[in-house]
Amino acid sequence: MTVSRLVKVKKACQNCNVRELCLPTSLEGVELNLMDEVVQQRIRLQQGDYLYNTGDGFKGIYAIKSGSLKTSGITIDGKEQVTGFHLGGEIIGMDAIDEEIHACDAIALTDTEVCHLPFDKIREISIQIPPLLKDLTRIMSREIRREEHVLMLLGSTTAEQRIARFLVNLYDRLQKRGELENIITLFMSRQDVGNYLGLAIETVSRQFKNFRDKQIIEVDKKNIKVLDMQRLLEIAE
């Protein structure tokens, strides 16, 4: 069941610290005011809450203001399959644009706040803000690239390569949000990492130990400090 708390907002976009990651950077003045009219509410989720469920009707897309979520579905044999991890400044919910039904669950991994953007309103104001439609296309393209990245991870790669590519990808995304340099915060469980990468949790732990032994990373609970990014990149590639 979807669990959420709605919060009315004012001037949501103008004062948002991740606005440049999910909206055209050229927007200003009247255009930003129009976007503020679209973002009329935020949704607050606690860890474990569902933003939406598989089969829910399409109500719009969601820009993550803070926190993190995972998306997952159920395989034909009834097992969970993690399909993605999503951070502040990223947009989710676009899986339902075509058939107007969500094809996966979206679950908060941490306390999270998202902005609800009704798609009908976005289409209306895109006539007045041409860069908006272009940027939505860019975001959709980014999501397609991520899906291709996952397929590459699950292809003919070793467990070591999968973990290295996962860490490099997460590091790049966190850096765009101004996180501490050389630090990767694992906001998801190792079990979720293994599920996402097609690896057993024991294999994930073994590869982290392997990278520690090679002095590529240091691990402190959920924080990973990258000691040798060049070596991590070499393994990933």
Image (tube, rainbow, N blue to C red):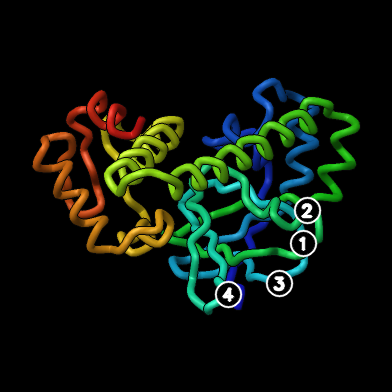
* Front position among marks 1 and 4: 4
Amino acid on which disc 4 is placed: Ile
The 10 Å Cα crowd at callout 3, few under 14, some 14 to 19, many 20 or more, is: few
Q: What's the residue at 55%, 46% (across, down)?
A: 65
Question: In the image, residue 214 lies at what x, y percent?
Answer: 11, 37
Please state which of the two labelled residues, at mark 3 or mark 1, is closer to the viewer: 3
* Residue at numbered disc 2: 97
Foreground label between 3 and 4: 4
Q: Name the residue at 80% across, 50% down.
A: 119
Residue that appears at 18% across and 38% down: 217
| Residue 221 point in image, percent of width and height | 19, 54
Residue 55 has which mark?
3
Mark 1 or 4, nearer chain start = 1
Q: Spatial distance from mark 2 to mark 4, Cα to Cα? A: 23 Å
Query: Which residue is tagged 1?
Result: 58
Residue at the image position 73 percent from the left and 51 percent from the top: 40
- For the residues labelled 1 and 2, say whether their Cβ atoms are less than 8 Å apart: yes
Q: Residue furthest left?
A: 213
- The kind of residue tagged 2 is Ile
Q: Earlier in the sequence, mark 2 or mark 4?
A: 4
Mark 3 to mark 4: distance in Å? 16 Å
- As drawn, is 19 to the left or to the right of 140? left
Given contact means CB atoms under 8 Å apart, are the residues at marks 2 and 4 in contact?
Answer: no
Q: Position of residue 7 (x, y in %)?
A: 63, 59
Mark 3 residue element:
loop
Q: Which residue is mark 4?
A: 76
Q: Measuring from the top left, give residue 29's x and y in whole percent.
A: 75, 24
Tag 2: Cα neighbours inside 10 Å, few (<14), some, or many (≥20)? some
Front-most of residues 116 and 185:
185
- Residue kind at label 3, given as amino acid type: Gly
